[in-house]
């Protein structure tokens, strides 16, 4: 089939690569407009745009996918199907109606669970044991279209959102190609999503990423892993923001109050609502990432208890 692929972040690149290796023709790519990126916040093309350009593909970057010029060009290209992975914008009805086989989205959850922008983060945050990826036909309602296929993925105890998303991006890319193959052959018929089991996964905000030390240790750990690498879990000490990476472990019951720091040799413990956790790497605002023990040695607390919040 003749395809126009839509995607934006690095997570979507494996899907584009898999489609380029398939028997289908990728006629063009749609991605979000160039945006500030990196430490210097220089305006740069998306990872998908860079990969598409390196493959010699036409790249469309509409400010909104309902823009008349974009819709006119999409009609000229005349795709049979538009596969999508993490494009980052809602597709309007005018665009949905152009390809004969519609727009087929790869979503990183087992729908109808975790509909929305951050399914992987919410799966970890809420302690799910299993997640996966789903392909479905895009309709007007958010992530509510009929399902073509799924793959499952175990959530490991030490998974960050980045780790899990990397695995799902690869297995999901294979699922997306298989779905497009099945649509072309007529062997795949999408099934409506069940009405039960719907949960929402809105974007994780900076405030969501702030650690609540009064929560149980397992919940604190999940929050940090769910927010790694973005937006980045954080806490504060004396008004200074500190970015946190996944913990090095959970200590025994040492009676450390929630949020209180306690240095024990090479270990830096912080109390939670249950047992203390051992900090891994930290990054105070304006400084480099470092082991927590190095950071703690430089605090010079003069015997006063340090409390994170």
Image: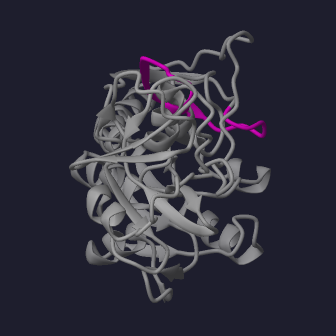
Q: Is residue 302 above or below residue 198?
A: below
| Image location (x, y in percent) of residue 238 | 61, 66
| Image location (x, y in percent) of residue 286 | 46, 80
Q: Is residue 136 above or below residue 284?
A: above
The residue positioned 57% from the left and 37% from the top of the image is 258
Residue 134 among magenta residues: yes
Q: Is residue 256 above or below residue 236?
A: above
Quarter residue 45 falls in: bottom left
Q: Residue furthest front?
A: 303
Residue 123 among magenta residues: no
Q: Is residue 101 visible?
A: no
Q: Is residue 92 left or right of residue 160?
A: right
Q: Is residue 103 visible?
A: yes
Q: Is residue 23 above or below residue 136?
A: below
| Image location (x, y in percent) of residue 161 | 42, 42
**Number of marks in the image?**
0
| Image location (x, y in percent) of residue 178 | 34, 31
Quarter residue 63 falls in: bottom right
The residue positioned 62% from the left and 52% from the top of the image is 309
Q: Foreground: 105 or 156?
A: 156
Quarter residue 289 falls in: bottom left
Q: Is residue 133 left or right of residue 190?
A: left
The residue positioned 60% from the left and 42% from the top of the image is 102
The residue positioned 76% from the left and 65% from the top of the image is 66
Q: Which residues are magenta?
A: 124-143
Q: Foreground: 22 or 160?
A: 160
């Amino acid at each position: 089939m003749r395809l126009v692929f839509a995607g934006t972040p690095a997570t979507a690149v494996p899907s584009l690569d898999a489609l380029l290796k398939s028997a289908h023709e990728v006629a063009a790519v749609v991605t979000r407009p160039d945006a500030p990126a990196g430490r210097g916040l220089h305006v740069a093309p998306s990872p998908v745009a860079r990969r598409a350009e390196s493959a010699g593909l036409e790249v469309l970057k509409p400010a909104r996918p309902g823009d008349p010029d974009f819709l006119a060009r999409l009609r000229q290209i005349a795709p049979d199907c538009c596969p999508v992975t993490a494009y980052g914008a809602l597709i309007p009805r005018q665009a949905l109606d152009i390809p004969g086989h519609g727009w087929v989205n790869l979503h990183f959850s087992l729908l109808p669970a975790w509909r929305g922008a951050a399914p992987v983060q919410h799966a970890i945050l809420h302690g799910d044991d299993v997640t996966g990826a789903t392909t479905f036909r895009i309709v007007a309602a958010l992530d509510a279209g009929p399902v073509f296929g799924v793959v499952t993925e175990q959530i490991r105890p030490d998974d960050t959102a980045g780790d899990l998303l990397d695995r799902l991006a690869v297995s999901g890319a294979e699922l997306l190609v298989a779905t497009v193959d099945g649509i072309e052959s007529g062997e795949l018929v999408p099934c409506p999503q069940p009405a039960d089991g719907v949960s929402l996964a809105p974007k994780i905000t900076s405030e969501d990423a702030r650690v609540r030390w009064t929560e149980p240790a397992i919940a604190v750990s999940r929050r940090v892993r769910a927010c790694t690498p973005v937006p980045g879990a954080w806490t504060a000490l004396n008004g200074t923001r500190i970015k946190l990476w996944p913990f090095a472990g959970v200590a025994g019951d040492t009676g450390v109050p929630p949020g209180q720091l306690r240095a024990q040799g090479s270990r830096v413990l912080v109390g939670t609502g249950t047992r203390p956790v051992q900090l891994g790497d930290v990054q105070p605002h304006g400084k480099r990432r470092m082991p927590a023990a190095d950071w703690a040695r430089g605090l010079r607390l003069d015997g006063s208890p340090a409390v994170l919040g």
